[in-house]
Image: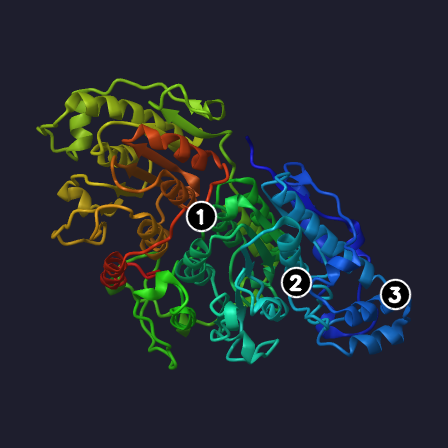
Amino acid sequence: MALRTGLIYNEQMKNYSLLWDFPVCSIEKPERLSASHEKLKYYGLVERCIPLTVREAIEEEILLVHSLDYLEAVKSTVSMNIEELKAFSCNYDDVYFHPNSYHCAKVALGATLQLVDAALLGKVRNGMALVRPPGHHSHKSEACGFCIFNNVAIAAKYAKRKHGAKRILIVDWDVHHGQGTQYTFEEDPTVLYFSWHRYENQQFWPNLRDSDYNAIGKGKGAGFNVNIPWNKAGMENADYLAAFFYVLLPIAYEFNPELILVSAGYDTAIGDPEGEMCATPECFAHLTQLLMPLANGKLCVVLEGGYNLRSLSESVCMTVRALLGDPVPPLVGEIVPCISAIESIQNVKAVHQPYWKFLKYQDVLINETQPKKQNIGFEGGDPESSTVTSKEEKKVPTDSDVSKDFEEFMDSHMKKVLLLAPAIRTALAGCGEKLNKLDQCLQVEERKITIEEAEILCSGGGGDCVFPMLEDLLLSLGKIFPLIDKIMKREVRNGIVVCSTQSSGVSAARYALRSGASRVLLLLLGEADIPIDVKEDEKVLVLHMYSKQDEKKLSKYYIPVCWKEDNKWDGDLLYSVFEIILPLAYGYRPELVILVVGSNIGIQAITIAHMTHLLQVLAQGRILVISQASDLVETLLSSLIGDALSAVSSFDLKQENTQVLVKLRQELKKHWWLL
């Protein structure tokens, strides 16, 4: 079944605008909606979504968050003249009212609630609500920052009351802190609120002490409010990824939400006059894809800010592409977080250590001083050979710095990242005839592999290699190689194969290199013998996760993760995805990911399925899964074709295994800077 993505848009929400000279609010204009919707139509995305009708929110719904006095005050603006509206707006911070504001605010809220209903009732898997006015700054009794009613906060309360949702995650990626949402839920442990925002040591609007990293919630809600304050402008893709890997995703998996609401502000994107940040549009596809395995896929994205119309509209389209299940484009630029971002992330981890298991065994301290500057290399390169200065020393690029003509820059950039999805998503071989999803896949015929061909690929070209179980190996390679051909020729996006020998993973990587891949990520779950030449080959990055203790020294391109215990690695494996695997892989930039799953590895199928989904942010989704265990195939296949995933039953971490990863990071960060 194809992914089902809802889209809500209605022209009514354009029917208000600023009626007097007020420069601070002049950027919040109707074109924000029309530009986004027109760009969605231009790329053919509107017709791929399920259109959802809008309705006006009713007063009972507004009162889930806002006071009756405030509601009545907003209602009174309907009959005001311009001078009265101007005087009324002056009662609040950076907001303006129009005679149609009340109606538009009710429609924006009603549209948000319609999307939540559709997702929780199974009418859509996920979706986006293009709404205005935005909402995340508005308080119980106060309009603020262009916001009148707090759409996402009310949606969370609504989901709890009407649908019985017990755990809701709100991800606020707007450049401004959503203080209204924070205040609504700061004592509520059923709603986890995550926000990154430009803060600059309280010098950036809304200039609140409550926006800093140590505002963690109150009472029972302590630990459920997560603020990452950016203390400088110019944050880039790598800074956002680091915040996801090291803070949001492990907390979210531990929290196990039933619904995700995104306060999607695109003033965090490049070229925005408010944010002055440097995330490129495809970054939002990556962030969306990383959230999609959670909450059984129930992900509702609601528009907040975004004031550069080109940057906003392209970022909206990238978000919708990810929701639809399109391949995620590779990120451009260096994948190196800046020192200021690292400092903020470390501070967040330190104050939240008492509340989350994944932080329990880490040594994290508040960093009160600015770290020393250091040299940082590009794209996971060797820092010893790099002359690049730290991002702290680089001038923060602005709209004019990026390009004298921003439209020209965006035209050029988008040509690099727009991808065509293969007509068929998933291929399979050797998986039997009883799978439920066969009609959604391409079954690839096996081909005969000669002993001579196997010798070249299995021995690295040295020849004269003796293979145990040679017949099984030849059969396995006969299934694997045709799948790699299909993936590398972009006839399919990904594939899965069942074979009896795990040693075929190395041969698969070598074959992929011969088939056109420049770099291959080989991820092994379980025991396997890795030839010495592969461990030193920069064209293959091997991450080997298994239970036996290995005294062999790791290298830059061979990284063994040696667990201290032999079973129930589920939490440890997922944590390693965030802590080690994805940061390494983003720095390495593979063109193909090969995941080899051994038998009897003590990991549940659903955990590996989540891992498989997360790995699809790499290599434009080109991933080959080789499984020794046929009983895992159904679940892993669901992940590859884009089905919603059930929750991982446990995110328990073992102290010894956590410390293994901490030690490993210390050893590897000299080579891989996203670590």
Mark 1 → mark 3, Cα distance in angstroms: 48 Å
Q: Is residue 523 above or below residue 24?
A: above
Residue 442, percent from left and from top:
44, 23
Numbered disc 3: secondary structure = helix
Q: Hey, what amino acid is under mark 3? A: Val
| Residue placed most toward the observer, 645 or 262 | 645
Q: Earlier in the sequence, mark 2 or mark 1?
A: 2
Point out the frontmost of discs 1 and 3.
3
Point out the frontmost of discs 3 and 2.
3
Instruction: Check disc 2: other Cα within 10 Å, few if <14, some if 14-19, many if 20+.
Output: many
Numbered disc 2: secondary structure = loop
Residue underneath mark 3: 78
Q: Earlier in the sequence, mark 3 or mark 2?
A: 3
| Residue placed most toward the observer, 246 or 668 | 246
Residue 663, percent from left and from top:
23, 62
Instruction: Check disc 1: other Cα within 10 Å, few if <14, some if 14-19, many if 20+.
Output: many
Q: Are marks 3 and 2 in contact (CB under 8 Å)?
A: no
Q: Report the number of numbered marks.
A: 3
| Residue placed most toward the observer, 40 or 596 | 596
Question: Which label number is shown at residue 330?
Answer: 1
> Coloured how?
rainbow
Residue underneath mark 2: 307
Numbered disc 1: secondary structure = loop
Residue 383, percent from left and from top:
27, 63
Quadrant placement of the C terminus: bottom left
| Residue placed most toward the observer, 190 or 110 | 190
Mark 2 → mark 1, Cα distance in angstroms: 25 Å
The answer to whether residue 405 of the structure is visible from this angle is: no
Q: Hey, what amino acid is under mark 1? A: Pro
Residue 268, percent from left and from top:
56, 63
Instruction: Check disc 3: other Cα within 10 Å, few if <14, some if 14-19, many if 20+.
Output: some
